[in-house]
Image: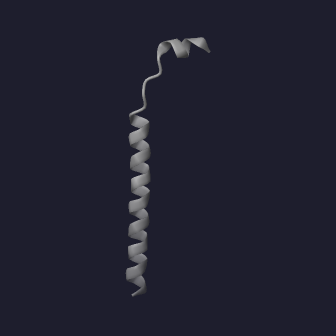
């Protein structure tokens, strides 16, 4: 029984980590482009 519950916990943690990583990658890949006027000021 303990092995099954440990397997369930690790599976849930892996799924949660995957959700966080995929969300972060999606947000990073779909960033809006910064206009050139804003980049030239600094």
Extreme residue in the right direction: 42
- Quadrant where the N terminus lies? bottom left
Labels in figure, total = 0
Instruction: Please tell me whether residue 21 is drawn above or below residue 26 in the rendered image.
Output: below
Picture residue at 39% right of the left edge, 54% below the top: 19
Instruction: Please tell me whether residue 27 is drawn above or below residue 20 in the rendered image.
Output: above
Structure colour scheme: one colour
Picture residue at 42% right of the left edge, 39% below the top: 27
Image quarter for residue 7?
bottom left
Extreme residue in the bottom direction: 1
Report whether 33 appears left or right of 37.
left
- Image x and y of residue 40, in percent: 56, 12
- Quadrant where the C terminus lies? top right
Image quarter for residue 17?
bottom left
- Image x and y of residue 5, in percent: 41, 80
Picture residue at 38% right of the left edge, 61% below the top: 15
Instruction: Please tell me whether residue 28 is drawn above or below residue 19 in the rendered image.
Output: above
- 17 and 35: which is toward the camera: 35
Picture residue at 40% right of the left edge, 67% below the top: 12
């Amino acid at each position: 029984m303990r092995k099954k519950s440990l397997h369930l916990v690790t599976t849930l943690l892996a799924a949660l980590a995957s959700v966080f990583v995929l969300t972060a990658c999606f947000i990073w890949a779909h960033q809006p482009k910064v206009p050139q006027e804003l980049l030239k000021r600094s």
